[in-house]
């Protein structure tokens, strides 16, 4: 319903307060409702260049929602985003990565028990087009080797690696760009810490 109301007049409905409302419901997953909400988030970004990284209020709306099921991520902030990426969820997303990454239609039959279980699984899968930019932002904020290590320890780096196998070219391209930034930043931070 939110998606359809927004799409009645996207330019008129595009605002920071609408994005805050959407992100307070969005879980960054491949679930059916999140697939519609990410379209609204992407449209708001294309209309007004508003996204998760625009302001503390927008960041906090997603963080507060996400922390309901991932309490340890509550300590993340726009200035220190690293805690937003939760290790157990990231590890599970690496092990169960959907290589096909197929876009499902909204008229899927979820009446059988097996189909209902599959629908629930989708809500546990990261949406790469949302999480890869979050990981890229974390890299931008990393200034110490310990912050790079936290991205390895919470499996963000591993998730970027599995995204290289996605059938979506845009996801593979984002993953490659992150890996190139990662490599460069690792070298810069290493050299800064070891001047000899």
Image (tube, rainbow, N blue to C red):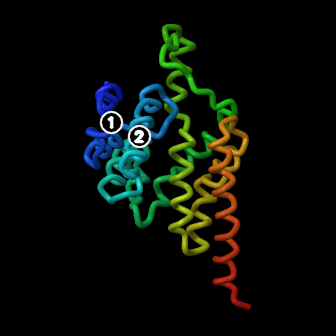
Horizontal relation, residue 2 to residue 53: left or right: left
* SS of the residue under disc 1: helix
The quadrant of the image that shows the N terminus is: top left
Viewer-nearest residue: 18 or 85: 18
Vertical relation: 165 (above or below) 119: below
Location of mark 1 (residue): 10
**x, y percent for residue 173:** 66, 48
Query: Is the C-beta separation of discs 1 and 2 under 8 Å?
Result: yes
**x, y percent for residue 181:** 65, 64
Mark 1: few/some/many CA within 10 Å (<14, 14-19, 20+): some
Horizontal relation, residue 36 to residue 60: left or right: right
* SS of the residue under disc 2: helix
* Mark number, residue 43: 2
Viewer-nearest residue: 123 or 22: 22
Horizontal relation, residue 82 to residue 44: left or right: right
**x, y percent for residue 33:** 42, 28
Q: Residue at x 50, y 67 (%)?
A: 141
The quadrant of the image that shows the C terminus is: bottom right
Which image quadrant is residue 101 in? top right
Vertical relation: 101 (above or below) 188: above
* Mark number, residue 192: none
> What is the CA distance from the residue labelled 1 to the residue labelled 2?
8 Å
């Amino acid at each position: 319903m939110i998606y359809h109301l927004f799409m009645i007049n996207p330019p008129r409905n595009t605002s920071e307060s609408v994005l805050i409302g959407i992100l307070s419901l969005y879980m960054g997953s491949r679930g059916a409702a999140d697939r519609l909400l990410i379209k609204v988030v992407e449209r708001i970004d294309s209309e007004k260049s508003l996204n998760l990284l625009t302001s503390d209020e927008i960041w906090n709306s997603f963080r507060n929602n996400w922390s309901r099921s991932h309490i340890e991520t509550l300590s993340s902030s726009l200035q220190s985003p690293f805690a937003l990426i939760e290790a157990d969820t990231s590890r599970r997303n690496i092990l169960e990565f959907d290589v096909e990454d197929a876009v499902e239609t909204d008229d899927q039959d979820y009446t059988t028990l097996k189909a209902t279980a599959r629908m629930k699984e989708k809500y546990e899968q990261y949406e790469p087009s949302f999480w890869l930019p979050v990981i890229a932002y974390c890299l931008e904020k990393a200034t110490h080797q310990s912050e790079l290590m936290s991205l390895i320890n919470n499996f963000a780096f591993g998730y970027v690696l599995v995204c290289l196998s996605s059938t979506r070219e845009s996801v593979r391209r984002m993953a490659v760009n992150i890996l190139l930034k990662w490599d460069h930043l690792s070298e810069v931070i290493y050299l800064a810490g070891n001047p000899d």
